Image: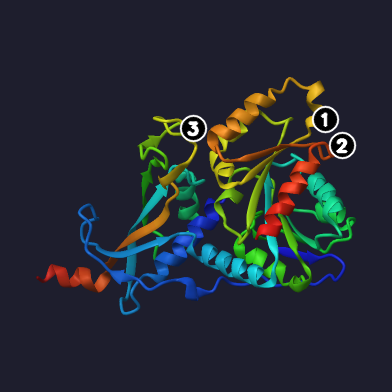
Amino acid sequence: MHEMGIAMEIIDIAIASIPADLKDVRVERINLKVGKLTAVVPESLRFCFRIAAKDTPLCHADLNIEEVPIVARCMDCNNEWTISQPVFKCRQCNSGSIEITSGRELDINSIEITEKGAQHADKHV
Amino acid sequence: MLISMYRTQQYYHHKEIDKAFHSHAKDGVASVNRKPGTREIKIVRKVLDANDAIAQQNRKLFAEKGVFVLNVMSSPGSGKTAILEKTLLNIMPEINSAVIVGDICTSNDADRLSGSGVPVVQINTDAFGGDCHLTAHVIETAAGNFELDDIDLLIVENLGNLVCPAEFDIGENLRVVVLSVTEGEDKPVKYPLMFRVCEATLLNKIDLLPHLDYDRQAAVKNILQVNPGMRVFEISAKTEEGFDSWIGWLKQNILKS
């Protein structure tokens, strides 16, 4: 539901990350990490991104979304496990004192770009 | 976005997120799986960095001004506005309060809350495609309408939605979620993030229990399954049953901040 705002943030960050000295850059892929506990639906995000990226250097870019499982660590017995059901208690000792060590990610890791000039130079090597 | 200030009727413009929050990219090592012929630029940033940075600024400003911020979230129709009306009656004038109300359309909630005599700012998100949550910069702008030095408690009534508001830090001190007994007992397990990020659940409309087949024990069990440390207050905004504990706990939190 809020994926459009997130898509627009991704576009802002990606455009700001293109080095200023490069000309005619086309962003081919954006590598993202999205935790399973994050309220983001990858398909909705892709849909919104396609619309929001129109007329930007990102208009041909694919969103490569790596989904990150929810991992918890028990503060009492140190047990670590992957949460697949919405039960946030230690499986080993039933303690409710747990730390979520991953699963809340909504990170942009990198972008992959091509440059018209660079592609041209490659051909002559 | 339209922000209307009750009593003083000021209008504020949408403020662009400061581009300074965008960090500079660094060239990085190419990943093994990258597309052929491309160059990879490492970024490694949180997508919501811009929001989180403004939320931290808000938090700092509110702390300097001695304002405690309560973010109230729930699905539509669970009784947020009714709870706030009764809460304000119980804490004023001891605790000077102000309210920011978020809705997609209408000023109905602000109209109701301004009856309590507190300054109320209504935010309508419809001009931005009906945003389903409040972000930190909206709170920053709205807070500019208040004399923060005179306020002890700023209550933010978020948009009715159990998904999106959970994702956005607005610079609050405390988050509570309202769940009413006319909703399913399984809402906490269906919307775990919301129940993970909140410190308390207000289980509202308990005056209706005699007329419903609602299993309150199952609801509480589901809440605690998702968040074992959650405080649960069973209340009725209509009869004010359970309000003593809720108000007492809220005051305790304000005092210790």
Report in which chain the residue with disc 3 lies: A
Q: Which residue is mark 2?
A: B239
Q: Are marks 3 and 1 in contact (CB under 8 Å)?
A: no
Colouring style: rainbow
Q: Report the chain holding disc 1.
A: B
In the rendered view, would you say B231 is above or below A46? above
With A1 as the anchor, is B81 left or right in this view? right
**B174 displayed left or right of A74:** right
Q: Is residue A115 above or below residue B183?
A: below
Quadrant in the picture for residue B147:
bottom right
Q: Residue furthest bottom?
A: A21
Q: Can residue B132 be seen?
A: no
**Label 1 vs 2, first from the N-terminus:** 1
Q: Amino acid at mark 1?
A: Asp
- The reply to whether dot 1 and dot 2 touch (C-beta < 8 Å) is yes
| Residue placed most toward the observer, B7 or A78 | A78
Residue under mark 2: which chain is it in?
B
Residue shown at the point (42%, 43%) measured from the top left: A75
Residue B48 screen position, x and y as percent: 49, 60
> Which residue type does callout 2 highlight?
Thr
| B243 with respect to A113 (left or right) | right
Q: Position of residue A53 (x, y in %)?
A: 46, 60
Element at label 1: helix
> Looking at the picture, does residue A89 appear above or below residue B176?
above
Looking at the rendered structure, the kind of residue marked 3 is Val
Q: Nearer the viewer, residue B228 or B46?
A: B228
The label shown at residue B207 is: 1
Estimate the spatial distance between the alpha carbons at disc 3 and disc 1, rounded to whole Å. Answer: 29 Å
Which residue is denoted by mark 3 in the rendering?
A87
